[in-house]
Amino acid sequence: MKRSRAASALAGVAIATLAACGQPPSATRGGDIVIGVSLPLSGDFAQPGGEAKRGYEVWRDQVNAKGGVLGRKVQLKIVDDASNQDTVVADYTKLITQDRVDLVLGTFSSLLNYPASAVAEKNQMVFIEPAGGSAKMFQRGFKYLFFAQPAAGGHQADVVASWIGSLPTAQRPKTAAYPSQDDPFSKPVIDSLRTQLEALGVRTVHTSVYPGDTTNFQTLAGTLAAAKPDLIAQGAVFEDGVGLVRSLKQLGYSPKMLFQTTAPSNAGQYSEGVGEANTEGVLYTVSWNEKAATPHNAEFAAAYRKTYGGPPSEDAADAFAAAQVLQTATEKVGAVDQDKIRDWLHANTVETILGPLSWEPNGEPKGSFMLAQWQSGKVEVIAPPALATTTNVVNPKPGWKAAR
């Protein structure tokens, strides 16, 4: 099903290119700077898409409160792609060729950013994406693409494998299971982790891939419970991560270690989904931490909490950082000039709430992720040591709690 959707989306890119030919986006219109964004505000990715929208809007409000960009107020023109590849292509085509926005920012997930970035590239528009770290994103030789996170998906598992390898032998998992959503970002992370842990001697007892629209995890949980792995490493976006934990809890099987790709990064929504007591010891890699002393991080977190009544999620922070990158480059070149912004980003480092970001020529970031763990209802960074927010580590993970 996804191959069919991808093929259709790429066909749409070709149409978009023809439609945009000879119609460069305006860079001289007076008044507000209009930034076009398509986000999955409904469908499979509605939860992280909504968080990305919050991150963009917190950035817009803070920037406008300080006079805007280049002395012009910022407008965000955000439309809903319904988590659909065909729709995201149509959205960015319209934003660029009909609405003639001044700038664009990326959507959520590699699945959607893959065709969306192709539309931007063909129209020579800088495309800074807050999510979308799949390796194939950077294999096309694009010049206008920039991934605003510390590292791409191919390296997300590195910090996990390194941390497990640093543990005393008796504390390492001896067996592991690797279920993953059929997602172009999540699955490569899990594949990479499996390869690295097998090299450390961790025996694989289960691998599987499930569709992105899976809602019933009872069968998978039963299979995992029968295999009894010490470690479950799940390629989970959000709902699937919550769903598997709930199903494992119902079956009474709790692994000694649980790693999930992005699901646990959804702050309060994750803890509400699985029950705060059941977050204890859950591991995930993270691009951002609320405690980090990075530029504007405290202001971002405070504004988010004031507006939405809870802690920011990583997806919101990544979107805020993507907008910071676009803002910084635009202000440094002093104009809404796509080629100048592209060239400046290829030659410079940008300070963001995630820390400093810089890129390879293909738009892949040069940094590395952190390993986070839920502890006592809060998120702590446990690796690498230089970025850790605590020396305490929960290992093994405690069993599930009855009350949610």
Image: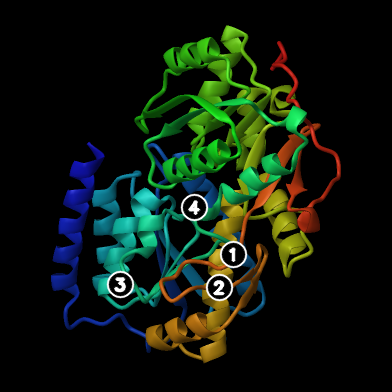
Horizontal and vertical percent for residue 346?
48, 81
The residue located at (77%, 61%) in the rendering is: 298
Local crowd at mark 2 within 10 Å, few (<14), some, or many (≥20)?
many
Q: Which residue is at the front of the view, 197 or 38?
A: 197
Give amino acid for label 2.
Val
Nearer to us of marks 4 and 1 is 4
| CB contact under 8 Å: marks 1 and 2 | yes
Q: Look at mark 1 in the image and give the residue it sits on.
A: 321
Q: CA distance from mark 4 to mark 1?
A: 17 Å
Q: CA distance from mark 1 to mark 2?
A: 6 Å
| CB contact under 8 Å: marks 4 and 3 | no
What element does badge 2 sit on?
A: helix
Q: Quadrant of the C terminus?
A: top right
Q: Which residue is at the front of the view, 169 or 188?
A: 169
Residue 153 tag number: 4
Q: Which residue is at the front of the view, 147 or 13?
A: 147
Horizontal and vertical percent for residue 6?
23, 49
Q: Earlier in the sequence, mark 2 or mark 4?
A: 4
Q: CA distance from mark 4 to mark 3?
A: 21 Å
Nearer to us of marks 4 and 3 is 4
Q: Earlier in the sequence, mark 4 or mark 1?
A: 4
Nearer to us of marks 2 and 4 is 4
Q: Look at mark 2 in the image and give the residue it sits on.
A: 325
